[in-house]
Amino acid sequence: MKPAFLALCVLFTVRLSIAADDGKPSPTGYSDTPVIPGTKWKVHDIDRPRPEVVTPGEKPGAAPSDAIIIFDGKSTDTLLGKDKKTGVITPCPWKIDNGELVVEGGDCVTKQEFGSCQFHIEWMSAPETKGNSQKKGNAGTFFMDRYECQMLDCYNNPTYADGMTGAVYGQTPPLVNAVRKPGEWQVYDIIFTAPKLEGGKVVEPAYVTTFVNGVCVQVHTKIMGPTKHRDITNYEGEFPAKAPIRLQDHKNDPPVRMRNIWVRPL
């Protein structure tokens, strides 16, 4: 490189640096900008409230500071048993082994009710699990006790598309099959948007965005109605604004295991 050209490059870089940092503090907002359409706030509004601070978990998948812990390996106090035929509520029947929930004894529901939320759960089926298709490593998360995001051992285990892990069960298949081998932990991260109600009637459906093991498999997917088996669904009737999250026991041998379950209401 010629000396004269090099000198010009250095001078240009110095001038850019001076322009980028003139010694004045950067403004924290403005009051002379136009109003953002559909809001009461101006662009970069200095008076607009700032979001509260949330501390992320120390490790990937760890609960952030504002999460509600459903299971941390120590206690089942946040859960209750629920008979899916009679609706009878009982103490949580699931046992803890090595910091993991052993999914055996019927479905469980959270004591707390939720609407729209961010949900995290990890689960695993054993390599020696018996059965095939829907009878192998099967479980599920039911938001508001009625909308199922399917959990299934789909590794070299053919089944119907809308019954695979990441599916809105009986409605919408996942974009891809992103499950790991049996014996490895599967990770669900789900954004659930509750339906909008007027007088108990649904005027806008529920939606879900789902990640399986970090892979997006549903993108703001419309949920057509409460989950049904071998039938279509709709939003006829009245619906609650909030309801418990239900975790399914599908009678696996050996049982599915779960861990690290938390929720952030949205």
Image (cartoon, rainbow, N blue to C red):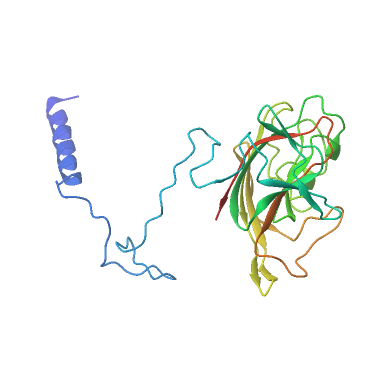
Q: In the drawing, does residue 4 fall left or right of residue 74?
A: left
Measured from the top left, where is residue 81 in percent x and y?
77, 47
Q: In the drawing, does residue 137 fall left or right of residue 26?
A: right
Q: In the drawing, does residue 96 fall left or right of residue 137?
A: left
Residue 150 vs residue 81, the one in the foreground: 81
Q: Based on the displayed image, in which of its 4 quarters is residue 151 positioned?
A: top right
Residue 213 vs residue 82, the one in the foreground: 82
Measured from the top left, where is residue 53 in percent x and y?
41, 48
- Residue 220 visible, this orientation: no
Which residue is rendered at x = 59% and y = 38% of the image? 214
Q: Quadrant of the N terminus?
A: top left
Number of marks present in the image shown:
0
When the figure is inspected, residue 117 is found, relative to residue 214, above or below; the finding is below
Q: In the drawing, does residue 192 fall left or right of residue 62?
A: right
Q: Residue furthest bottom?
A: 199
When the figure is inspected, residue 77 is found, relative to residue 222, above or below; the finding is above
Measured from the top left, where is residue 127 in percent x and y?
78, 25
Residue 188 vs residue 5, the one in the foreground: 188
When the figure is inspected, residue 100 is found, relative to residue 69, above or below; the finding is above
Which residue is rendered at x = 60% and y = 57% of the image? 116
Q: Quadrant of the C terminus?
A: bottom right
When the figure is inspected, residue 27 is found, relative to residue 128, above or below; the finding is below
- Residue 106 visible, this orientation: yes
Q: Based on the displayed image, in which of its 4 quarters is residue 240 positioned?
A: bottom right
